[in-house]
Image: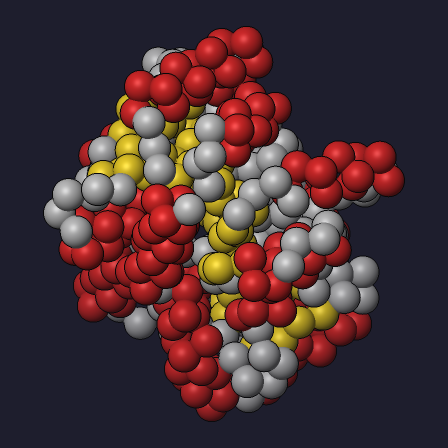
């Protein structure tokens, strides 16, 4: 019998719910006597409380919520005590922590290793995420090199771990950036089948209207590439945030106010209906640990234009194949890629088909199966030691 304990920050994380459900399925499929428990520290992050999705998320895996409130309201001492208590009660054969930024989880990792329990670290970080001081990097090296195995979102997070001294062979999963591809595709197809064909072509951005998203550059590039009457393309912005008023003003100043649609913010499960009205996704961010909206668009068979500083770019975008990458500070580069699709409508479907091929390795079921196999190998190694 194998027991796996996963520590995660918040219950209301819809794509993680899909992944945990698939991990549980894979564990049970291999051996009905094996068990999984996901210790959810809290219900949500305070800034995301309004994104609660009610019945749209299925929690089809064993979990325990340690604190029935916001993560931000749970202090270090509370987290540490609750995590240690859960560990001692559950007595896992493998521990999976989902970050080395939380000292409560780090201390639990050291405790597990002292108890002889192997540890997996799930990592989404990359070297481009934030400015990093040398002493912090030394601390991270000390932490990560106490783990036995690693699950990474993609190439950028795997490469970053290797700079911290992690051996390639210890990185067991390099494509953990998964979404609920079934729900996204079903809702996309439903919207396509029930709505009339759009009158105009559209580029679409989905995300917060915030400074780090680099949206003024997108507006300026779009104005140069698609200004009427030469083009009838539109730019659809799905999301809300502190920059909305400034962006609306900029669109008017650029003379494209009637071509830019500010749709407002919507929960994740409504995003597919906006993608169904669009042709090409654009993610121009200055900083983006991954960019799961790119997965969503590619699952729907769409081409993508993504800045090189988005963590997903090395894994998911092949220039000239399923879209393009660009330097977020290089307006002319983004303008060129926008103009490519305006002038080559016949390439959109084919490049969207290539997106479907490139996103396939990030399907939730095979990724979860890899994770379950890693847990089993670690548990067997522990019992055989």
Residue 186 picture location, percent across and down: 23, 61
Going by the picture, which residue comes out furthest to the front? 385
Colour scheme used in the picture? secondary structure
Choose between 211 and 339: the one closer to the eye: 211
Residue 122 picture location, percent across and down: 51, 45
User: In the image, what residue occupies the spot 66% across and 71% down?
Assistant: 325
User: In this rendering, is residue 343 above or below 256?
Assistant: below
Q: Is residue 29 visible?
A: yes
How many numbered marks appear? 0
Quick check: 178 left or right of 319?
left
User: In the image, what residue occupies the spot 37% across and 55% down?
Assistant: 377
User: In the image, what residue occupies the spot 28% across and 37% down?
Assistant: 3
Residue 161 picture location, percent across and down: 66, 53
Q: Is residue 112 visible?
A: no
User: In the image, what residue occupies the spot 35% across and 38% down?
Assistant: 93
| Quarter of the N terminus within the rendering | top left
Quick check: 144 left or right of 190?
right
The quarter of the picture where residue 144 lies is top right
Quick check: 59 left or right of 76?
left
Quick check: 191 left or right of 31?
right
User: In this rendering, is residue 258 above or below 341?
Assistant: above
Going by the picture, which residue comes out furthest to the left? 32
The quarter of the picture where residue 84 lies is top left
Residue 87 picture location, percent across and down: 38, 23
The quarter of the picture where residue 369 lies is bottom left
Choose between 89 and 124: the one closer to the eye: 89
Choose between 182 and 208: the one closer to the eye: 182
User: In this rendering, is residue 215 above or below 199?
Assistant: above
């Amino acid at each position: 019998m194998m027991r796996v304990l996963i520590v995660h920050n918040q219950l209301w994380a819809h794509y993680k719910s899909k992944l945990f459900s698939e991990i549980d399925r894979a564990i049970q499929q291999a051996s009905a006597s094996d068990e999984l428990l996901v210790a959810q520290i809290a219900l949500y992050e305070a800034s995301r409380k309004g994104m609660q999705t009610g019945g749209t998320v299925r929690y089809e895996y064993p979990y325990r919520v340690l604190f029935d409130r916001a993560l931000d309201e749970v202090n270090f001492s509370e987290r540490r005590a609750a995590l240690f208590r859960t560990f001692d009660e559950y007595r896992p054969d493998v521990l999976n922590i989902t970050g080395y930024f939380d000292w409560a989880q780090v201390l639990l990792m050291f405790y597990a290793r002292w108890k002889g329990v192997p540890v997996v670290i799930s990592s989404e970080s990359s070297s481009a995420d934030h400015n990093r001081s040398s002493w912090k990097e030394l601390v991270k090296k000390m932490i990560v090199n106490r783990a036995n195995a690693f699950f990474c979102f993609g190439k950028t997070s795997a490469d970053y771990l290797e700079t911290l001294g992690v051996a390639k062979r210890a990185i067991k999963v390099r494509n953990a950036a998964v979404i609920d591809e079934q729900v996204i595709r079903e809702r996309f197809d439903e919207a396509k089948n029930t709505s009339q064909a759009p009158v105009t072509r559209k580029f679409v951005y989905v995300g917060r209207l915030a400074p780090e998203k680099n949206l003024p550059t997108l507006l300026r590039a779009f104005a140069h590439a698609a200004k009427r009457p030469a083009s009838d393309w539109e730019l659809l912005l799905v999301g809300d945030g502190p920059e909305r008023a400034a962006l609306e003003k900029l669109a008017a100043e650029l003379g494209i106010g009637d071509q830019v649609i500010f749709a407002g913010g919507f929960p994740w499960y409504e995003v597919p209906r906006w993608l169904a009205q669009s042709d090409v996704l654009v993610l121009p961010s200055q900083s983006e640990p991954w960019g799961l909206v790119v997965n969503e668009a590619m699952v729907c068979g769409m081409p993508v234009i993504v800045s090189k500083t988005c963590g997903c770019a090395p894994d998911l975008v092949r220039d000239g194949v399923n879209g393009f990458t660009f330097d977020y500070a290089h307006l002319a580069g983004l303008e060129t890629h926008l103009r490519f699709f305006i002038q080559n409508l016949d390439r959109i479907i084919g490049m969207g088909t290539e997106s479907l091929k490139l996103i396939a390795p990030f399907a939730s079921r095979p990724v979860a199966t890899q994770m379950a196999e890693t847990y089993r190998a670690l548990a067997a190694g522990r019992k055989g030691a």
